[in-house]
Amino acid sequence: MKNVLVKKSTAGLGLFANVNYEKGEEIIQYLGETITSDEANRRGGKYLFELNDQWMIDGKSRTNIARYINHSCRPNAYPELSQDETQVRIYAKKRILPGEEITYNYGPQYFKIEIKPFGCRCQKCSKVSL
Ligand SMILES: [Zn+2]
């Protein structure tokens, strides 16, 4: 059985829990190529995850299913950097039940540039009830 499933959500595809997650439990790693910020600026794209001032993960590959996790203004998960700032993992912010969409807050900078101009479609902001 898979721990997570990619399914339709209010904001296109999303990642959904297929098992229980307890608060603080690791859900998934954000996988991708580690590139410099300069290279990231050249490439652009929606799946860049900032590690620090110098490095980013480009998570555009479809094998990185963490890329399907949508932004939410009231998320049930959060990303955390490894201590050496080379890896990102997504953890449950609270208990998550099977069938629930997994979301985290993309942060104010991303929100301002990529989400706000188009309207946030997270469950808190969206009028669509699931
Ligand atoms: Zn929102």
Image (tube, rainbow, N blue to C red):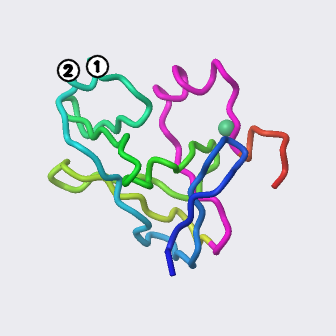
What type is the residue that disc 1 sits on? Asn
Residue receiving disc 2: 38
Q: Sort mark 2 into few (<14), some (14-19) or many (20+) by Cα contacts within 10 Å.
A: few
Residue 33 or 70: which is nearer the viewer?
33
Element type at marker 1? helix
> What span is colored magenta in the figure?
97-122
Indicate the quadrant of ligand 1 in the picture. Answer: top right
Q: Secondary structure at mark 2?
A: helix
Residue 27 percent across, percent down from the top left: 44, 67
What is the number of the mark on residue 110?
none
Which quadrant of the structure image shows residue 20? Answer: bottom right
Viewer-proximal residue among 25 and 31: 31
Where 90 falls versus 34 (above or below)? Answer: below
Question: What is the x, y in percent for residue 58?
Answer: 30, 38
Indicate whether 3 appears above or below 30.
Answer: below
Indicate the quadrant containing the C terminus: top left, top right, bottom left or bottom right. bottom right
Which image quarter: residue 63?
Answer: bottom left
Q: Is residue 11 found inside the magenta-colored segment of the image?
A: no
Amino acid type for the residue under numbered disc 2: Asp
Report x, y in % for residue 118.
Answer: 67, 22
Does 44 sit above or below residue 46? Answer: above
Do tag 2 and tag 1 residues touch (Cβ < 8 Å)? yes
The reply, left or right, for residue 128 in relation to residue 110 is right
- Residue at (54, 24) in percent of width and height: 114
Residue drawn at x 59%, y 27% as measured from the top left: 115
Residue 119 lies, in percent from the top left, at: 70, 26
Q: Which residue is mark 1?
A: 41
Distance, label 2 to label 1, CA atoms, is 5 Å
Looking at the image, residue 129 sits to the left or right of residue 36; the answer is right
